[in-house]
Image (tube, rainbow, N blue to C red):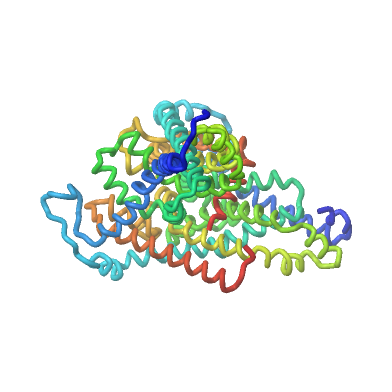
């Protein structure tokens, strides 16, 4: 990795400079729209219309106060926290249980059951949107919290089971067997041996589930109708989408919608990128 | 705990434990994903149009492939399909090469501050598509910041994006997801044995030769995987387009999922037709995944 320093010829200095410029260009490209959004959210709508690109001449926070109250953001954020927390915990528990069963208890049904989970990774959410909407309606769960949570959990299962089974399989069988011989129950083994040892993959599954659930928009948009049940993305879409010309409030609402994930990412960026790589190369 | 257990007892307990562990998750998954997928195929062969499934006013009849026949003569279906293909093109010829380039520069340490660049370039991917969609919609609007920015660089710029409504959508897709491919490539580049690269460099191989003869062959399997991701990603694209254009103007930015949504939730619902579209989407994705797997077996890939 030190080879750049070794070649101090002019040519390699030029190519290093060009490489830096290209990388900086892409970084600026990635960040500029978000900067533009945040800057614009501190302008009044009147100022925005005259000064679309520059810094605000007068920084105002009124947009945030308005959007926070009128967009009902406290309710939206509480709902998003609720959906994300319950979904993540349920997926972790259920997929670790299944992974434990699949990898540590010999049973002839495993091939079929585990195989059907793996096929589920390939199914797209879009292809079940319409039937799921109809089914949720028929069973009377339309516009209820449960009617959102059950699909969220079921949809996250394939990835959780796949990653969980892979990982739990690598825990030595001897650990489980010797605990069995000592008379430990399966639930004891699950909580005392499997769960602590599978914590790293639990982190990966949790990261994937949290980002996926927090940002999910399509399903919750069709499965709920009342304001009290909406999540942050749906609320932002309804509120900011309707304000097509009231730019100040719109940008403030978008910035509020941006911040939770931005913080989550900056705190867990190592784990997120690791999880994405693990989740993506599953094919 | 010194209770004596017979073999049969132990086996029964084992079986009970197995089902207790596996069944809750499995039932949930089946009822939410597998059953609706099959159910969708069945519905696409009927004339069901809302209301109760049994004992409704209009009895449900099987109509065979009627909706599929209607689909293959529907120009909007092809319009949506074409836009899906555009998204695949942008992924395969835009995101994947770009993601690879960025990953390569960072992995080989051609610039310092790898952590910083990686964090910032990946950032757009984690933000809610709703925020991203509305943000860019405002940015690209006729009175938004884009025309102003263009006029800053090219004084005579005339706003012409309304004639090419797919361009902003494709641009945002490129902007948002290239970082994901970068992360996938970095993760797999790290699996390559570094001593091979160092040895090649010591033997006098140039940076380009290392790339051509060491790194690319080692990554061919991953490149195939990213191609699968690009295709399934195109079929998944819904949120961003729904927010940015909702398929408009006049369905010109519609993709299969948006087209399906319109058939089911906009105006008078046509559930069988919507389900026929979703069945076609499932078939396309399985077909393409099979094709890519085939290509992987045929042309190698060291995974």
Visible in this render: residue A216?
A: no
Q: Is residue B45 left or right of residue A179?
A: left
Residue at x 74%, y 53% (from the top left corner): A20
Residue at x 48%, y 59% (from the top left corner): B167
Is residue B160 shown above or below A52?
below
Q: Position of residue A201 (x, y in %)?
A: 58, 42
Q: Position of residue B142 (x, y in %)?
A: 45, 51
Outermost residue on the left side: it is: B57
Q: Is residue A7 left or right of residue B301?
A: right
Q: Position of residue B255 (x, y in %)?
A: 39, 59
Residue at x 48%, y 56% (from the top left corner): B233
Asked where in the image residue A16 lies, by quadrant, the reply is bottom right
Is residue B279 shown above or below A69?
below
Asked where in the image residue A227 lies, by quadrant, the reply is top left
Visible in this render: residue B28?
A: yes
Asked where in the image residue A157 lies, by quadrant, the reply is top left
Outermost residue on the bottom side: it is: B298
Is residue A68 shown above or below B86?
above
Residue at x 59%, y 55% (from the top left corner): B181
């Amino acid at each position: 990795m030190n080879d750049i320093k070794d070649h101090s010829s002019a040519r390699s200095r030029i190519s290093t400079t060009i490489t830096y410029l290209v990388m900086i260009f892409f970084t600026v490209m990635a960040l500029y729209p978000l900067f533009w959004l945040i800057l614009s959210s501190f302008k009044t709508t009147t100022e925005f219309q005259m000064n679309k690109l520059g810094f605000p001449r007068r920084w105002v926070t009124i947009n945030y106060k308005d959007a926070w109250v009128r967009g009902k953001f406290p309710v939206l954020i509480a709902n998003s926290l609720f959906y994300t927390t319950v979904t993540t915990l349920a997926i972790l528990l259920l997929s670790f249980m299944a992974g434990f069963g699949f990898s540590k208890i010999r049973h002839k049904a495993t091939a079929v059951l585990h195989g059907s989970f793996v096929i589920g990774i390939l199914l797209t959410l879009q292809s079940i949107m319409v039937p799921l909407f109809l089914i949720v309606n028929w069973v009377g769960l339309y516009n209820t919290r449960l009617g959102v949570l059950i699909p969220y959990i079921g949809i996250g299962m394939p990835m959780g089971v796949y990653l969980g089974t892979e990982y739990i399989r690598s825990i030595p069988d001897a650990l489980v067997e010797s605990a069995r011989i000592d008379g430990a129950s399966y639930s004891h083994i699950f909580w005392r041996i499997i769960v602590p040892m599978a914590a790293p993959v639990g982190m990966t599954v949790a990261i994937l589930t949290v980002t996926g659930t927090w940002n999910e928009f399509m399903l919750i948009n069709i499965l709920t109708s009342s304001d009290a049940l909406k999540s942050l993305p749906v609320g932002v879409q309804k509120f900011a989408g309707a304000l097509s010309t009231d730019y100040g409030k719109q940008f403030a609402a978008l910035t509020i919608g941006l911040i939770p994930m931005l913080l989550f990412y900056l705190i867990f960026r190592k784990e997120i990128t690791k999880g994405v790589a693990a989740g993506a190369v599953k094919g | 705990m010194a209770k004596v257990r017979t073999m049969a007892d132990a086996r029964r307990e084992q079986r009970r434990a197995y089902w207790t562990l596996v069944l809750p998750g499995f039932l949930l998954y089946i009822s939410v994903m597998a059953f609706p997928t099959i159910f969708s195929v069945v519905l696409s062969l009927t004339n069901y149009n809302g209301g109760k499934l049994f004992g409704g006013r209009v009895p449900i009849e099987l109509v065979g492939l009627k909706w599929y026949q209607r689909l293959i003569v529907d120009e909007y279906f092809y319009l949506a399909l074409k836009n899906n293909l555009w998204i695949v093109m942008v992924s395969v010829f835009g995101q994947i090469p770009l993601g690879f380039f960025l990953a390569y520069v960072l992995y080989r340490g051609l610039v310092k501050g790898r952590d910083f660049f990686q964090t910032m370039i990946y950032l757009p991917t984690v933000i809610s598509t709703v925020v991203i969609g509305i943000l860019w919609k405002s940015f690209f609007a006729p009175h938004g910041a884009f025309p102003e920015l263009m006029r800053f660089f090219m004084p005579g710029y005339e706003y012409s994006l309304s004639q090419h409504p797919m361009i902003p959508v494709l641009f945002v897709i490129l902007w948002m997801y290239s970082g994901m491919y970068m992360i996938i490539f970095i993760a797999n580049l790290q699996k390559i044995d570094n001593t091979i690269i160092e040895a090649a460099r010591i033997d006098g191989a140039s940076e380009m030769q290392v790339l051509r003869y060491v790194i690319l062959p080692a990554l061919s399997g991953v490149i195939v995987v990213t191609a699968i991701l690009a295709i399934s990603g195109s079929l998944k694209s819904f949120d961003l387009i729904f927010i940015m254009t909702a398929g408009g103007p006049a369905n010109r930015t519609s993709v299969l999922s948006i087209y399906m949504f319109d058939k089911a939730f906009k105006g008078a619902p046509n559930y069988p037709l919507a389900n026929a579209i979703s069945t076609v989407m499932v078939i396309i994705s399985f077909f393409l995944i099979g094709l890519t797997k085939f290509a992987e077996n045929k042309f190698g890939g060291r995974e």
